[in-house]
Image: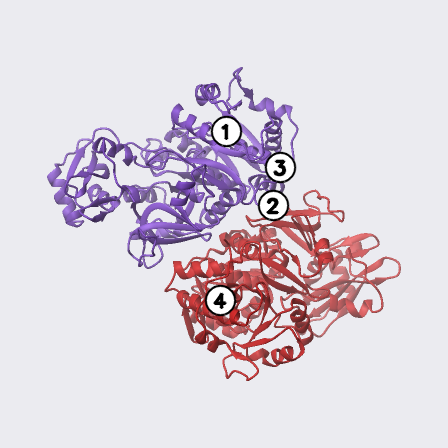
Chain colours: A purple, B red
Amino acid sequence: MISLPAMIERAARLNPDGVATRYAGRQYSWTEVGDRTARLAGALRSFGFDVGDRIALLSLNSDRYYESTFAVCWAGYCVVPLNTRWALPENAYAVKDSESRAVVFDDAFADQAQQLVADVEALEIAIYAGEGDCPEWALSYEALITSNDPVVASRRGDDDMAGIFYTGGTTGFPKGVMQSHRAIWASAVGALPDFSMNRDSVYLHVAPMFHMADFAGSMGVTLCCATNVMLQSFEPGEVLRTLGEEKISHSLMVPAMIKMVLNHPDLSAADVSNLKILMYGASPMPAATLEYCMSIWPNVGLVQAYGQTEMAPVLTTLSVADHQAGGEKLKSAGRPTAVVELRIVDEQGQDLPRGESGEIAAKGANAMIGYWKKPEETAKAMTGDWVFTGDAGYFDDNGYLFIVDRVKDMVVTGGENVFTTEVENAVISHDAIMDVAVIGIPHAEWGEAVHAIVVLHEGQSVTEEELVIHCRERIAGYKLPKGVTFRDQPLPLSGAGKVLKTELRKPYWEGRDRQVN
Amino acid sequence: MISLPAMIERAARLNPDGVATRYAGRQYSWTEVGDRTARLAGALRSFGFDVGDRIALLSLNSDRYYESTFAVCWAGYCVVPLNTRWALPENAYAVKDSESRAVVFDDAFADQAQQLVADVEALEIAIYAGEGDCPEWALSYEALITSNDPVVASRRGDDDMAGIFYTGGTTGFPKGVMQSHRAIWASAVGALPDFSMNRDSVYLHVAPMFHMADFAGSMGVTLCCATNVMLQSFEPGEVLRTLGEEKISHSLMVPAMIKMVLNHPDLSAADVSNLKILMYGASPMPAATLEYCMSIWPNVGLVQAYGQTEMAPVLTTLSVADHQAGGEKLKSAGRPTAVVELRIVDEQGQDLPRGESGEIAAKGANAMIGYWKKPEETAKAMTGDWVFTGDAGYFDDNGYLFIVDRVKDMVVTGGENVFTTEVENAVISHDAIMDVAVIGIPHAEWGEAVHAIVVLHEGQSVTEEELVIHCRERIAGYKLPKGVTFRDQPLPLSGAGKVLKTELRKPYWEGRDRQVN
């Protein structure tokens, strides 16, 4: 049987003395993590929840976050990793929606956790996994481990639900993605060939562990019986220091993080001699950042992973060799992993010819069970084995996938589909532009008009007219921005580093309904 | 759903124009192989067999072998790849035991196939997949493809049986190993990280395709949407020529094949510039051959895979980096793949401390369903999720597995267990010895005595006494050969290149029962 607990048991058996986790000066072997997980599971079981009940995690990165994830499943429950970027009302929604019975929290979320316990009736237990004194309204994580005997792992696994992962995507209300033990396992297994990890590897968790991308990293580390090193949260200087001090061989970051790390003053002093693979994903990496990274760190293998929570999450990878080949490939999301099948379909779900852009549909052992308590949303997103990703893209002749847009972000103007990524690439190729987001705004005649929101490099300037002239040399007339907004603030980003186009669109669409597929 | 047909559909979708197979001057794209498979499946269905019925393959390597494997499953039946080294009675046994309803055969096996159809009542249909004229008692493979419409693939998959793989092992009567679609898939997926294959890869089938090792190669190629090139059978000069002409990037051979290739006069003229990965397995590779191979082909990455039919088949891999590291690691079978968990157990099935030798037990999504119609054998080989491999080995501190013997080949002398591999290593380190097999022969006092059967290098000589003195410096006294047989003939090998110790033991044990665990 495939299950998260079985993965821990396996690592404890195959690499008993190897370091499993290192965080804040603590270090546990795989034997110790197996034992602690089994004890924490014993504590959770003593609360008398029903098999399959949900338990929420609300915490920054830590070794205990890792243990909790597995302990919840070990006890026979399902894990609900809450979004650390969310405010109380959003997490309260997720806790209520998932009917979570307990929450594991840390110092950063003590206030939110206390409020949740007070507000949400079903939420009975709060477990304090922080570094200070346990609040009186909570139970101490370490005390639970000390005072409970290890229990035998639950026989839940395979197609049983392992967790609910809330995704706002970049649009709409949170949906709980139900993932099975097997789907989580399959996504990680599929990504292993490009991740080149073995039990001597040391993986740095610096992207948020609640997010499916780093969650998949946790699974990969476990499958390889390698070492997890956690940073509580992202600080570029600390990342650079940790890469050297902890002899990090593997990590996963979102492009925005990589950019900040590369722009940090300590960059040149940093020791990255052990860093073998840097995986990035969750959003596209600007070509300039990519090329800069490869020039600064020529011995670091870059791997892009593209996916989504609904696919647990990996769909395609762009390999180290693909990065070294350079050129057009750098703009690609790579090729499907061995566990994934993809199609490009039109609005009727029919296959499109190669080279044409349409919605990416995905199939594989890593597909979600569906959306929690949302049968209609599930039916919209899944047909038979196929999951409709909501992303638009195309395949080239060599089987490389190019993402052109979120389907919902696509601008429909005068009957033509405009993929905003294409317009954004044209705009950002202007030297004055630091960042750009292209959205559709209401237009009486065309339905929507292409609109660019730009952030300038400091000290640079460009007029709207100059920018449109610049773009005219690069893209067709109907794709040109019909208007440009100059913005002083950085673009609003989601927790995963994606531009929140819903927010950018909001002021333009107030009081109207935007029609999307 | 995971299934062999789904793997073909996926490859046809992801790499429609890519070359799927190349054999004897023919070439088919993935679209064509998908279409041909679906048509052949249509033909098979027209015979009116029941879902899950068995269809045997009795043929040397070819593109049609590959297609047939998938077509049988596509139609909803189970494949029975017969052993091309077996004589008629053995294959008749397998056909009868599996109750196969049809057989796909080629020119080399026309006589056997005709006899089987005549002798075995359940065997109704013979399909001629050879290169000449179709015999009148058979149906033409190509005519069946031409005259049948493609059918929709069966929904059998996941835990359903995909095939029965007969294994004599090196001892005893053939047992039919039942493998599910998922197990076959899982073994291949687990091996991918070390196999470094993608859709630009070209894999040479030169080991027999009926054998689980190359069968797994077929699955890996399919998962990667890469190219299959087949050689009908092994001829070292042809292998060397094909490596260059077909720009082979990947292949799998047994050590005996590699040795013959490296000893061939055309070696120095051969073009191996495209050969990236040479996987070997099925039996241990002598250190001298390994080192010679690495010195002759420094740019070819060597990967060892250890496994058995019961595990579909891959358990551990020794990576390219492990080979480059050299030293003691070269004697290891490597580390478990990400889908496999291993234990070392004593005769009571209890875990042994690290470093101690015992039976290797294995668990994973690649485990067999059991032995076909042999519930008692199945119960002996499997306990819960664990498969007892019958191999003896130990783990070192770094998690590398070392195989010391088949449990059944282990010599029990005066109450001590002697692992024959250890004795063989001592013997073969003598310059005069070309090959050696150590077996247990009856001994009135000790139960069994350690006995060495040796083949000398041409023109060399050594006495029994000299050999024992040579070994005494290397191994403990109770492990020393108590007798030596000098043999003119090469040692008898199984189809997989393993020394048939059962045969070597036979003359010594006639009329007695050898006690094994």
**Residue found 41% across the figure and 29% down from its top:** A238
Q: Which mark is residue B204?
A: 4
**SS under mark 2:** loop
Name the residue furthest right: B445
Tell me the mark number nearer the camera, choosing from 4 and 1.
1
Q: Position of residue A295 (x, y in %)?
A: 32, 44
Residue A43, quarter of the rendered image: top right
The residue indicated by pointer 1 is A100
The residue indicated by pointer 3 is A153
Q: Is residue B364 visible?
A: yes
Mark 4 or mark 2, which is nearer the start of the sequence? 4
**SS under mark 4:** strand
Q: Chain of mark 3?
A: A
Q: Chain of mark 4?
A: B
Type of the residue with mark 4: Leu
Type of the residue with mark 2: Gly
Inter-mark Cα distance, 4 to 1: 54 Å
Inter-mark Cα distance, 2 to 4: 31 Å
Marks 3, 1 in one chain? yes
In this rendering, would B177 be left or right of B442? left
**Residue found 47% across the figure and 41% down from its top:** A216
Q: Is residue B298 visible?
A: no
Q: Which mark is residue B399?
A: 2
Q: Which mark is residue B96?
A: none
Tell me the mark number nearer the camera, choosing from 2 and 4.
4
Q: Chain of mark 1?
A: A
Q: Chain of mark 2?
A: B
